[in-house]
Image (cartoon, grey):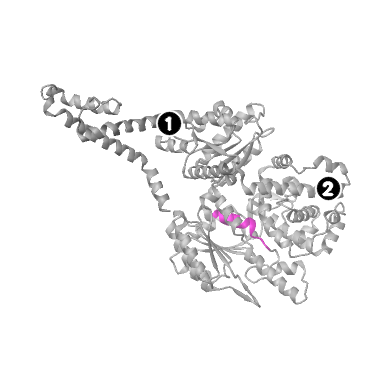
Amino acid sequence: MEKQGRNGWFSRHKKALAMAFTAVIFGIALIGSVEYYTQVRYAGEVVYERLPSTILFSVIKLYAFSPTVSTGVPTPLCYEAAKWLAPLCTAYWLLRALEAVLRHRLELISRRLGKKNQILVVGYNPESAAFLVNLEEENQTKRREGGDEHLAVLVPDQVLEQEVRLELERERVLVRQPLKAEDAHKGEFAGSWLRDFKEAVLFGSNSPGNFVILKRVLDWAGSQNGASISGRGKIRLAVRCENRILRKVMEDYYDRFPGEKPLELRLFAMAQMAAEDLFAREPLYANCLDRGRAWLKDQLDKGNRPGAAAVLGQIPNPHLLIAGFGSLGQAVFEEALLTGALSFCSQVEGYKRLRITIIDRDGEKCRELIQSRYPRINKICQVEYIAASMDSIQVERGLRRLPPVTYGAVCFQDQTTAVEATEKLRWYLSLYGGLEDGNLKFPERVPIAVRLQSGGTVLRFLMEQEAQETESPCALLDFGGGKRILNRENVVGSRQEEAAKSFHLGYCKIQQVMERQMNGAVQAEEEASPGGDDDARERLWNGLNFEKRESNRAQAKNRPYMARLLELFEPLPPAEEMFRNVGNTDQFLKELKERDVPDVLAAQEHLRWCNFHYVKGYVGRCRDRKDKGKVRRIQEDGEVYCGKVHNCLIDSWQEMREDSQARNTICYDVCALYGYRGQGDSGTEGKE
């Protein structure tokens, strides 16, 4: 650690040290020349008026590898030292100049001859800088293991300092000339540059600027009669977009691109990736499902075999505490909405619905933001607000009025406030205990996730301190660190993206079984068969619009929970048997009701499907199927809501079964169960 600190200090001050060393040597050379040419023997040889010029010329000659004093002539000590050190300074700065001129060309030639994989990174800021550092570390590992490297080409949005540019190129990052958004449509950028890349990232913090670049690149590609930009298939383009509204604009523009799309587009935001990282590492459902599993084990030990509804009735829904409702808190909130509806029929008091408590000084502003963004939030979860700062007693008083927290996320941007919130929640949750229900105590373990900077030093100390307290139920963890989210796999590849693609592929196979039973058409299997290769997976995925992709992503996030939930029950019947009478809706629903597990879990899947649409801005149900996905105004519960509508957006499972149109789509909820059960992440949204 100490050695790394010294190396880091030297790297930061290397230029200043070189300048200082050059200045010191210049001083030594000047002193040596003065001492030499002011000796008595030169009194009659050097004209006094020419003495300064003679001394200066002597100093310059030292730096030019040609001292004015002949070899072997006695000279002062300073002059003798300068005779050796001055040429070293000249050589150093000359090599620096050659490095600046030739490094770029040599690296470019090396990459082309070696046919290296390259990533185009547009925009230079702290996030893209961290991405480049992590990419180089990955490349070092790949070089040791003999794997394929992915080298970066950086296009900054403004001219970089020479020192920064050289440092990047030493790390094998080629730096191009800055790009202006209005020039992105030119062939030099959209054609020649991108033809050399398989992957690209628009990392600019200015989301409108990223959209301008995306639009003009797509416009240029459209003018080429749909020609692929890379010439080797579609390039993967990741675009940073922190604004929700602009994200929707980008999605719509990409969906409306005519013909075959030349890019595979992925949109990302820093807060969103941090939230995904949080729940991927520490699932929201873990302690809730453990309680249901413990209850079931207790019943089985007593000789009882409860039904699926009874088991789900004993699984509590999470109670999530979010401290700080900035961009990160909002991302954690939405991620919880997509993954937190664990049991539609929970009977655990205080946990019958997903519950989220927000601690923020401006509670009213948080309320207005949530109600504006999610018009039907009351259908998804119960939200409480504690409008107080973390150093206020109102925080503890507010928490005492609520059931114990099952999960905590500290999302303050200010690091001092984040540490204060972590300590207060840790003390409070350790002392407040859980609910006692017979022999079960809930929750036994409360994760408290914190996103801290400063290398995580403070959090590591708190985690070590917490580990020493064996009776504490709290488990501290960090999330959203730069190395975990700012890497190539997460930014360009995205683990969630790959899971969703496999999800969709697996479901297509299950859907074929259902359609074959429904239509009795063997040909349908041959035509729609996606195959098991990567090309089929990509082809099916590229056929979906952004909303359907988002739906698959949400289902992929839900798969780990449903897969573990399915382990509690008897195996599902074979798909051919389950969908034997799917063509006859009445008979299919009758047989489904006779099968306890598929019926209850299909109802659970339908609730998740409804919640997803409410999160994405849908407000309710439409009677006419033609209005599906369109913006309409509906009146319900004495309120008027404006937003998208869907003909299957029915909250009650019984009403769903009785509706003349919606009941025909229940088979897709059952299909999803087989997707959750299948190997890998497979499944999709048939109702779409």
Q: Position of residue 298 (x, y in %)?
A: 71, 74
Dot 2 corresponds to which residue?
515
- Secondary element at image label 2: helix
Q: Position of residue 140 (x, y in %)?
A: 53, 43
Q: Is residue 657 above or below residue 646?
A: below
Count neighbours of disc 1 (C-alpha within 10 A) and say few if under 14, some if 14 to 19, many if 20 or more.
some
Q: Position of residue 248 (x, y in %)?
A: 60, 43
Dot 1 corresponds to which residue?
99
Whether residue 662 appears in this view of the structure is no
Mark 2 and mark 1 residues within 8 Å of each other at the beta carbon: no
Residue at image position (64%, 62%) is 285
User: Which contiguous range is marked in magenta?
Assistant: 330-342
Q: Position of residue 287 (x, y in %)?
A: 62, 66
The circle drawn on residue 592 is none
User: Which picture quadrant has residue 606?
Assistant: bottom right
Is residue 68 found inside the magenta-colored segment of the image? no
Residue at image position (24%, 33%) is 80
In space, the residues marked 2 and 1 are separated at their CA atoms by 65 Å
- Secondary element at image label 1: helix
Amino acid under disc 1: Glu
